[in-house]
């Protein structure tokens, strides 16, 4: 191998290492600015979001559309059947939520989708 070939292979390897390395979490959930997605839990993350944005229509006493999501057991059903994320993302085939309002922030949707992808644990 002559010197320039070694140099070129060196550059190629360096480029490959830098471009091939990526964080899987970033790939799945593109960065949406200053969004803290560490330590996502049901009690500390998901429940407060639901409480301030959804509970008014989806508690046991006000079950609009017959949907109750203000307890873990209740929301787990919608986390598992895809309707929670489908409606938050305003995906076709789902009723867009929160009803007649803007989508939740990208950060809040991202947090809930991470929780769902973790299996929607009761933590
Ligand atoms: C103003 C009342 C209201 C608010 C606020 C609201 N919803 Fe709803 N939701 C409804 C009604 C009514 C339905 C029944 C479908 C319809 O009529 O749109 C429904 C249906 C749903 C469904 C079933 C969707 C489907 O495709 O079957 C889910 C899941 C849901 N809501 C989640 C949420 C979440 C999560 C929030 C908070 C981010 C939220 N909702 C906020 C009124 C509301």
Image: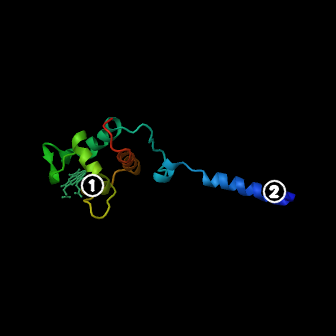
Determine if residue 70 is in view.
Answer: no
Q: Nearer the viewer, mark 2 or mark 1?
A: 2
Residue at image position (31%, 57%) is 86
Looking at the rendered structure, the secondary structure element under dot 1 is: helix
- Does label 2 or label 1 sit earlier along the sequence? 2
The residue beneath circle 2 is 6
CB under 8 Å between discs 2 and 1: no
**Which residue occupies 78% across, 59% down?**
8
How is the model colour-coded?
rainbow
Instruction: Locate residue 51: give its quadrant.
Output: top left
- The x and y percentages for residue 2 are 87, 59
Outermost residue on the bottom side: it is 92
- Seen at 16% across and 54% down, the residue is 65
Label 1 C-beta lies within 8 Å of the nearest ligand 1 atom: yes
Q: Position of residue 32 (x, y in %)?
A: 47, 50
Q: Report x, y in % for residue 108.
A: 37, 47
Q: Residue furthest left?
A: 61
Quadrant assignment, res 10: bottom right
Residue 78 visible, this angle: yes
Q: Quadrant of the N terminus?
A: bottom right
Q: Which residue is mark 1?
A: 83
Categorize mark 2 by other alpha carbons within 10 Å: few (<14), some (14-19), many (20+).
Answer: few
Quadrant where the C terminus lies? top left
């Amino acid at each position: 191998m002559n010197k320039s070939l070694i140099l070129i292979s060196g550059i190629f390897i360096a480029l490959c290492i830098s471009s091939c390395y990526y964080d899987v979490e970033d790939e799945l959930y593109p960065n949406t600015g200053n969004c803290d997605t560490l330590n996502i839990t049901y009690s500390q993350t998901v429940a407060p979001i639901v409480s301030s944005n959804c509970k008014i229509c989806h508690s046991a006493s006000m079950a609009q559309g017959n949907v109750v999501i203000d307890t873990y057991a209740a929301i787990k059903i919608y986390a598992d059947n895809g309707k929670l994320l489908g409606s938050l993302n305003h995906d076709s085939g789902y009723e867009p939520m929160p009803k007649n309002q803007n989508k939740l922030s990208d950060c809040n949707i991202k947090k809930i989708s991470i929780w769902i992808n973790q299996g929607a644990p009761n933590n």
